[in-house]
Amino acid sequence: IEEREMWKPVKGYEGYYEINKQGEVKSLHKKNYGYIMNQRFDRGGYYTVRLSKPDMRSCTVYVHRLLGYAFIANPENKPFINHKSGNKLNNEISNLEWVTASENMNHAYQNGLSNRPGECREIIDNFSGKIYKSLKEAAEYNFIEYKVFKSYMKESRNNRTSMRYRYDTKCSRSINSLTYDKDLFLPIIIDEL
């Protein structure tokens, strides 16, 4: 069998979907049997695909994780898939590896994909010069609902405040701790900077 034509069941969706080494996901549903599923980019720049089963809500999953489950051995049961090259669009099997959260963060630091250890994001009010150590602190101090303030800070062009992020290399706070939802395969941030 040609390498491209080697299909394996998608973990959690056995009998409903299969994936090949190129990351193509094929539907096995009777109505769409053999259909190659459309992939999209998420906000983080990763390929995703939407999967469903009867009597279950549809779910968006990362293609690189599906490839990892299907084609990459994970004897140490590590929870994350890392793109060795740092290129999120390169889902070749040779570019993917299972890693721990710590290994993933170290790889990001070493390859300039993330802030260096000890470097933190603070919020500075450009009008008053006041510095806040967290989004929560800035929101509470300025009587702005946390969710609204967080959305302002995410989108600088829609930010209706005089506050901006500032990166401090002498920051002593610890790096966010990460976990993941095993059912959805999506990383979840536990504590906010």
Image (cartoon, rainbow, N blue to C red):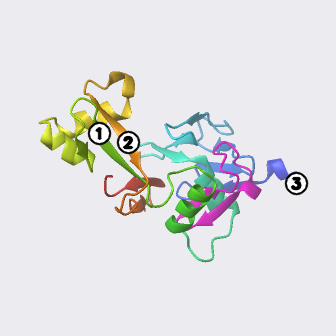
**For the magenta stretch, what is the residue range?**
79-99
Question: Counting other residues with Cα less than 10 Å from the Cα at mark 3, is it few (<14), some (14-19), or many (20 or more)?
Answer: few
Furthest toward the bottom, the residue is 76
What residue is drawn where x is 66% and y is 62%? 97
Residue under label 1, please give it.
Answer: 124
Residue 89 on the magenta segment: yes
Q: Is residue 10 visible?
A: no
Query: Of 118 and 106, which appears nearest the observer?
Result: 118
In this picture, residue 168 sits left or right of residue 52: left
Residue ranking furthest to the right: 2
Does dot 3 land on a helix, a strand or a loop? loop
Dot label at residue 97: none
Q: Circle 3 sits on which residue?
A: 1
Q: Which amino acid does label 2 sit on?
A: Arg
| Circle 2 SS class | strand
For badge 3, the amino acid type reads Ile
For this orientation, the residue located farthest to the front is: 129
| Lower position in the chain sequence, tag 1 or tag 3 | 3
Identify the image quadrant of residue 93: bottom right
Q: Earlier in the sequence, mark 2 or mark 1?
A: 1
Vertical relation: 180 (above or below) 22: below
Q: Where is residue 161 in the image (x, y as percent from the top left)?
A: 25, 27
Residue 79 appearing in the image: yes
The alpha-carbon separation of the residues under discs 2 and 3 comes to 54 Å
Ranked by sequence position, the earlier of labels 2 and 3 is 3
Give the residue drawn at x 38%, y 59%.
Answer: 176
Residue occupied by mark 2:
166
Is residue 63 rendered magenta in the image? no
